[in-house]
Image (cartoon, helix red, strand yellow):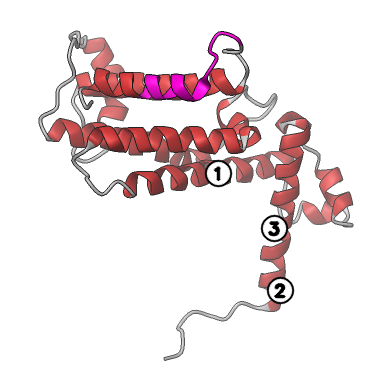
Amino acid sequence: MRSVSAPRTARAIARAELTRAILELAGQQLAEVGPAALSVRRIARELEMASSAVYRYFPSRDALLTALIVEGYDDLGSHAEAADAAVTSRNRHDLRWQAVSHAVRDWARSQPHRYALLYGSPVPGYAAPQDTVTPATRITALLLSIVRDAEQAGVRPVGTIPVSPAEAASVHPVATMLDPGVSDEMTVRALTAWATLFGHISLELFGHMHRGVLDYDVHFTQVVDQVAADLGIA
């Protein structure tokens, strides 16, 4: 049976390949000089193109940064989702939390420049557009789904303090992100777990635990297990 989709033209293939080449060179620059120093002219020079030709693919430096950010969030999300899917015992919420947490850290350690673009200091003069929101929430939704599934299975964290009406209103967008949603108490715990996970990874990657923690692997495992206990899923 013939495919109903139109065949890709040589021009379309060439455009896709050149787009990929631009992104790969931009990624190399991220690792070398950081996002603030990203240079479209340098990319054009390395591709033996005019800068104006590169701008036909990405109309501005900010558009190129956005593409790198979206690609980074999607790559991280796919990596973490694959780790969660590999846990065959879906009711073992502790194993799912551990798998996702370690997957996020492994991804961050393997390409710290991409992690820094997503979770490091804001790039001066750059404002992330709406295009980045959905990819950015993939990892948040994944972590929240583990907490939601645990809550639906009857799990309740210990030592939870009452959530004030003001706080309930504050976290409402997260509490209702999934369908069905998550209770206010578990939403606060989930946000705390999310902040602990990414805060810990950032402290490690950016050198803030140097000489304070002697074995990062052992300490990270302890932190992940402690958070699981705080969530009531250990």
What crowding class fits label 1: few (fewer than 14 Cα within 10 Å), some (14-19), or many (20 or more)? Answer: many
Residue 223 magenta: yes
Report, in whole angstroms, how far the alpha carbon at label 3 lies from the one at label 2: 12 Å
Quick check: 223 above or below 56? above
Query: Which residue carries the number 2 mark?
Result: 11
Residue 41 coordinates in the image, percent (x, y): 86, 44
Pointer 3 or 2: first along the chain: 2
For the stretch drawn in magenta, what is the main secondary structure?
A: helix
- Nearer the observer, 33 or 84: 84
Report the magenta residues as a range: 211-224
Q: Secondary structure at mark 1?
A: helix
Identified at 60% across, 9% down, the residue is: 211
Residue 76 magenta: no
Query: Which residue carries the number 3 mark?
Result: 19
Q: Secondary structure at mark 3?
A: helix
Identified at 66% across, 30% down, the residue is: 126
Query: Which residue carries the number 1 mark?
Result: 70
Residue 202 coordinates in the image, percent (x, y): 54, 22
Position of 85 with respect to 20 (left or right) is left
